[in-house]
Image (cartoon, rainbow, N blue to C red):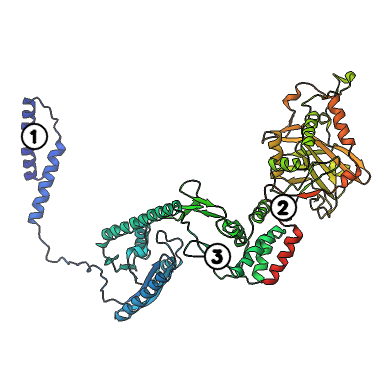
Amino acid sequence: MDDPEITSELAEITDGQNELNDDNAYSGITRPWRPQDADKEVIREAIRRRVRTSSVADNAIFYPAKPKPTINDTDDKRVAVYARVSTKSTEQVSSIENQTKYYTEKIQKTPNWTLQEIYSDEGKSGTSTKKRAAFNRMMKDARNKEMDLILCASVSRFARNVSDCIKRVKELQTANPSHPVGVYFETEDIYTLDPDSRQLLSIHALLADWESANKSRRMILSYDQRICTGQYPVLDLLGYRHTTDGDLIIQEDEAITVRFIFLAYFCGFKSDDIADILTKKKRPTLKGRTEWNTQMVREIIKNERRWGDLSARKTIVIDYTEGKTVKNNNIRDAAFVPNHHKGIVSPEIARAVHYSVSSRGFSDGVQDMIIIKHGALKGFVSVCPGWNGIDNETFMTVCRSVYDEDELNKLITESNLVCGKEKSKDIINQALGYEFPRSVYFMSRYTPTLTITSNSIELNRACFKRLGECPYIEIMYHPYLKMVIVRTSTSDNPNSLKWIKKNNSFTGKLTASAFAKAIYEKMTWAKNYRFRFRGISRDRGCGKLLLFYLDEPQILVGSREVSYPETWGNVQIGLCYELKTLRDKLANSITEQDIIEQGDVVVNPLIGVIPTREKAYEELMQLLEKM
């Protein structure tokens, strides 16, 4: 260093450090010498000396800072007001009106203030700004420099979320640095352009957030207590009004709309068609809207209160700041009360409609359950593949209903014989030990086949040819005999399928989720495999049909690989004479009358007793006239 005074000071410090090291050495402590310590001390002393001896230059010009911004500045200001209430009750609406009147007068009485606009959100939560239309419009206007100041009654009215509150205030200050917009919270006396207000604002925002969280906890506890004591929350909805005792009373004029929607679905109308009819008829919603859409129509039929049941707490809010709602899968206490009140429609009609709506690609309304009660095809259930209102137990129950006890026992025995599970006592002795080729080993593209997957069934073009290119077919299933029959049909059969498109092309692949699931369950098949069966054709006069035995599958693994049931072992032919004889007997016993037999409508156990299509359509037209 060139300064002799600093050099001298450094030398003294160095000597002192050497003495300190000597003392440490004497005491047995070794401390290494660090020259930078001496340098730092010299620099600190130099700074102190300069401060003591420095003075302001005669030609220096001093610029004082502006006073801190306050709400009482005399500059002209365009002032906006933000008001919010969380519900639309009469008390809260009155609060909005009072705030509007108060701030209008306050701005008029302040000489340098001009009212820009009053922004108000009614019935909106303060935990998030996403759904507050007026608030978001105010922020946009602020970014466009359309105001200088925003008045708000309190921090909690502005936002109950700490991060949202701080973020929005900062955005107002920095979006246009040359034109910052301040917010004045009157209750807390905080003006956000005042630099000293930031920490105070953070504290109040945190308190508002805490109050919101506490309110959420109180609401959860309140719901828990009400559910446990049977005081289920009920609200008005289209077709009902609620009483102070928690009862739901039918509103007859609105109930016409609700019943029309259910019966229209029942009769096969589509959602958009129903919405168009209600719009043309100017039928009001609960809120008075007369324009309907598909979603609104579907929401009507989803609410269990329309048929008299009550589900309390079906959904819950898991994040009060975002308003995130999820299905309540036993996360919190819930309750279901059947027959809680009088329904606008019966539970049976409601169930039938729900199955109809869930049946993708199926638009014929509620499907009848039809079964053959007589002849060689007795016990076969008519199937509409796209209909979801069926399952394995339904097929078994309906099939059993046409047999008495003795017939059912005989049927089970015959089923075991046909499926090869039992041996007949009447078998011809000389036929023992003989086997016939299983038909599935010899399938080609000219063979009529049925392929079943976990959600569809497919008939190939050979089936179309074998059935005489008949435009309509009917599919039938016997769960005990484990057989599927495809027979020719006509357009007047309610369960007939048209497998010819408008351009006269053939389509054999049909969506059949519920039907396929029932078969997979009955046959205990692996869901990731497909199963193909050879059809056995029978012609009887004008009628034709194909029989498919479900216990003789060709198992399709992947796109090309083919396998067979393990129970067949390594035998290449494998169908015993007895089994072949029984199956031929069953197939040959079918008559022309059996093929054209229409069957009888029976009650679907999944749904219950419902009106006929004709009766439902008649009532639908009556409701339409009342609208």
Amino acid at dot 1: Gln
The disc, 3 or 1, on the residue closer to the chain's N-terminal end is 1
Number of other residues with Cα within 10 Å of mark 2, as a class: few under 14, some 14 to 19, many 20 or more = some
Tag 1, which secondary structure? helix
Of labels 2 and 3, earlier in sequence is 3
- Write the residue at 85% across / 30% down: 582
| Neighbour tally class for label 3: few under 14, some 14-19, many 20 plus, Cα within 10 Å | some
SS of the residue at dot 2?
loop
Q: Indicate which label's residue lies in the foreground, 1 or 2.
A: 2
| Quadrant of the image occupied by residue 85 | bottom left
| Residue type at numbered disc 2 | Phe
Q: Position of residue 216 (x, y in %)?
A: 39, 55
Counting labels gives 3
Identify the mark at residue 362; answer none if there is no mark: 2
- Residue 613, percent from left and from top: 75, 58
Picture layout, residue 104 above or below residue 534: below
In the figure, residue 443 lies in which quadrant? Answer: top right
The answer to whether residue 187 is left or right of residue 96 is left
Which one is in front, 57 or 71?
71
Q: Does residue 474 sit above or below 256 in this rendering?
A: above
Q: Outermost residue, front direction?
A: 405
In the picture of the structure, the residue carrying the numbered disc 3 is: 249
**Label 1 crowd bin: few (<14), some (14–19), many (20+), radius 10 Å:** some
Q: CA distance from mark 1 to mark 2?
A: 96 Å
Residue 146 visible (yes or no): no
Q: 490 or 554: which is nearer to us?
A: 490
Pointer 2 with pointer 3, Cβ within 8 A: no
Q: What's the amino acid at mark 3?
A: Ile
Circle 1 residue:
17
Identify the residue at image location x=82%, y=52%: 493
